[in-house]
C-alpha cells in the first residue's frame, strides 16, 4: 500500500492476521493488542479505533509519515463493521515495538551517558522534523509515546500515537489545548493559538529529563499542574542546579535553553535542532555518566507519571576526569527532597519492602554535581 493516500482495506482482517487478546497498551483514542501475520508469522501491533472523523484524522496523519525511520510504521490498515455491536472500526496494523518505552528502558540500564542521551534526542528530533516538514504537529510528544524497536543496544527509537496530531495549514493555527502537564508549552497554557513549535518545547522538556532524571517544571502541591507550576512554565522559570548540571556540557544546556524559549517564534525549529552541534555532532558529545535511570526508578518518577496520567484525560563510564556520584541527600531539588522525606517517614514507621535504597546518587566531580 502506498503511504501517499490512506486507503484502508475492506476485507476481513482475520483473513490476514490472527488477533490475540494480549493488550500491549492504550493510546489517546484506542487500545493496542498483539496480532500475528498469518502469511509470514511476524508479530505485529494492532490499534483499534472506533470509526469517526477524529480516528480518520489520526490514521491519515500517522499513515502520511509512516515511512519515517523514527515513526512507528503502519504496515496495513482495515475498516470493518463489528457484527456484534454494529459499530465501524479503523484497524491499524503496525510494527511491534518490542523494546518498550523510552524511560522504562533507561531505568533498566546500569549505565547511561550524555553521549547516549544526545543520540536519543537526535532520533526524536528526526521524527519531529519529518512531521513538521509535512506540516503536521504531533501535540503529545512525551516519553510514553517514544518506543524502541527491540531490546538490542542498537534499537531504533520511534514516535507513536497520533491521537492529538493536527495538520498545520497556517502559522499558529492550532487552538484546542490537548496536552500532558509536564510537557505543555507556555502558549498552550496562555490559551494562545499555537503551532508546530509546541513540539519543540516538549522536546526541550524530554531532553532536560534525559540528562537529569527530573523535569524543569513541577507541581509543589501534589496536583497534576499547580498555579505555581503554570506560572513557571509561562515565564520560563527553571534552573540548571550546579549540584546536578555542573558536568553536563554547555552544548546540551544551550540546546535546552533554545528549546524552552517562552516565545514560540524564538524557539528552535526542528531543522535548527538537527543542525545544532550537540545533535549534529552527537558522536563527539562527552561520555559523562548520568544517574537518570536511578532517579527515574524511584518514587519521584512514580509521582510524575501519576500526575501525567490523571491530567492527560482531563485535558487534553568512568575515567580520571569523569564525575563521581553525590549522595542524593545533598541534592537541593524539591522533587528529590520529597522522596527523601518519604523514606524518612517510612523508616520512622518501620521497615517496608517497597522502600527505595538510601544510596541513590546524584552526579558530581570530587563531591558535587550530577546528570
Image (cartoon, rainbow, N blue to C red):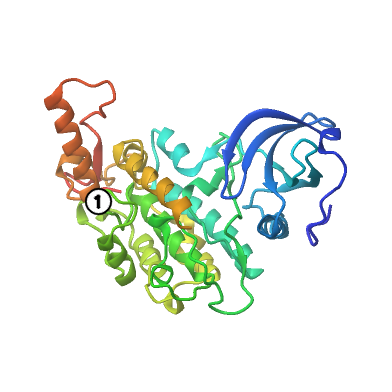
Residue at image location 25% in from the left, 62% down from the top: 228
- Indicate whether 84 appears above or below 288: above
Residue at image location 39% in from the left, 37% down from the top: 111
Q: Residue furthest left?
A: 348
SS for dot 1: helix
Is 354 placed left or right of 200 in the picture? Answer: left
Q: Which residue is mark 1?
A: 244
Give the x, y percent position of residue 259: 42, 67
Give the x, y percent position of residue 167: 64, 68
**Residue 211 seen:** yes
The 10 Å Cα crowd at callout 1, few under 14, some 14 to 19, many 20 or more, is many
Q: Name the foreground residue: 366 vs 55.
A: 55
Q: Name the foreground residue: 366 vs 334.
A: 334
Q: Residue furthest front?
A: 85
**Residue 369 seen:** no
- Indicate whether 11 appears above or below 170: above
Q: How many marks?
A: 1
Q: In the figure, residue 299 lies in which quadrant?
A: top left
Residue at image location 24% in from the left, 28% down from the top: 357
Q: In the figure, residue 257 lies in which quadrant?
A: bottom left
Give the x, y percent position of residue 285: 42, 55
Residue at image location 15% in from the left, 44% down from the top: 330
Give the x, y percent position of residue 327: 19, 38
- Indicate whether 193 appears above or below 84: below
- Indicate whether 237 appears above or below 345: below
Is 40 placed left or right of 324 in the picture? Answer: right
Amino acid at each position: 500500500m502506498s503511504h501517499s493516500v490512506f486507503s484502508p482495506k475492506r476485507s476481513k482482517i482475520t483473513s490476514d492476521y490472527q488477533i490475540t487478546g494480549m493488550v500491549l497498551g492504550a493510546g489517546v483514542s484506542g487500545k493496542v493488542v498483539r496480532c500475528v501475520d498469518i502469511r509470514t508469522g511476524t508479530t505485529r501491533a494492532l490499534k483499534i479505533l472506533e470509526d469517526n472523523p477524529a480516528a480518520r484524522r489520526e490514521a491519515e496523519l500517522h499513515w502520511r509519515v509512516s515511512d519515517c525511520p523514527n515513526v512507528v510504521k503502519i504496515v496495513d490498515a482495515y475498516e470493518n463493521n463489528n457484527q456484534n455491536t454494529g459499530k465501524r472500526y479503523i484497524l491499524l496494523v503496525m510494527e511491534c515495538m518490542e523494546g518498550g518505552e523510552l524511560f522504562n528502558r533507561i531505568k533498566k540500564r546500569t549505565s547511561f551517558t550524555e553521549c547516549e542521551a544526545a543520540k536519543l534526542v537526535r532520533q526524536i528530533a528526526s521524527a519531529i522534523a519529518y512531521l513538521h516538514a509535512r506540516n503536521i504537529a504531533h501535540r503529545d510528544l512525551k516519553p510514553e509515546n517514544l518506543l524502541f524497536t527491540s531490546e538490542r543496544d542498537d534499537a531504533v527509537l520511534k514516535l507513536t500515537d497520533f491521537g492529538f496530531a493536527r495538520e498545520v495549514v497556517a502559522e499558529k493555527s492550532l487552538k484546542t489545548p490537548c496536552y500532558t502537564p509536564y510537557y505543555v508549552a507556555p502558549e498552550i497554557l496562555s490559551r494562545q493559538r499555537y503551532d508546530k513549535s509546541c513540539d519543540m518545547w516538549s522536546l526541550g522538556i524530554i531532553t532536560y529529563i534525559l540528562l537529569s532524571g527530573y523535569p524543569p517544571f513541577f507541581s509543589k502541591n501534589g496536583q497534576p499542574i499547580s498555579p505555581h507550576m503554570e506560572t513557571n512554565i509561562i515565564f520560563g522559570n527553571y534552573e540548571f542546579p550546579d549540584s546536578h548540571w555542573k558536568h553536563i556540557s554547555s552544548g546540551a544546556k544551550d540546546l535546552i535553553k533554545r528549546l524552552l524559549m517562552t516565545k514560540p517564534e524564538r524557539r528552535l525549529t526542528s531543522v535548527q535542532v538537527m543542525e545544532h552541534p550537540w545533535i549534529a555532532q552527537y558522536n563527539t558529545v562527552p561520555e559523562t555518566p548520568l544517574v537518570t535511570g536511578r532517579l527515574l526508578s524511584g518514587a519521584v518518577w512514580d509521582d510524575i507519571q501519576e500526575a501525567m496520567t490523571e491530567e492527560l484525560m482531563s485535558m487534553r563510564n568512568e575515567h580520571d576526569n569523569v564525575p563521581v556520584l553525590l549522595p542524593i541527600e545533598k541534592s537541593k531539588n524539591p522533587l528529590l527532597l520529597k522522596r527523601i522525606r518519604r523514606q524518612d517517614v517510612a523508616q520512622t514507621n518501620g521497615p517496608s519492602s517497597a522502600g527505595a535504597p538510601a544510596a541513590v546518587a546524584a552526579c558530581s566531580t570530587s563531591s558535587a554535581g550530577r546528570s
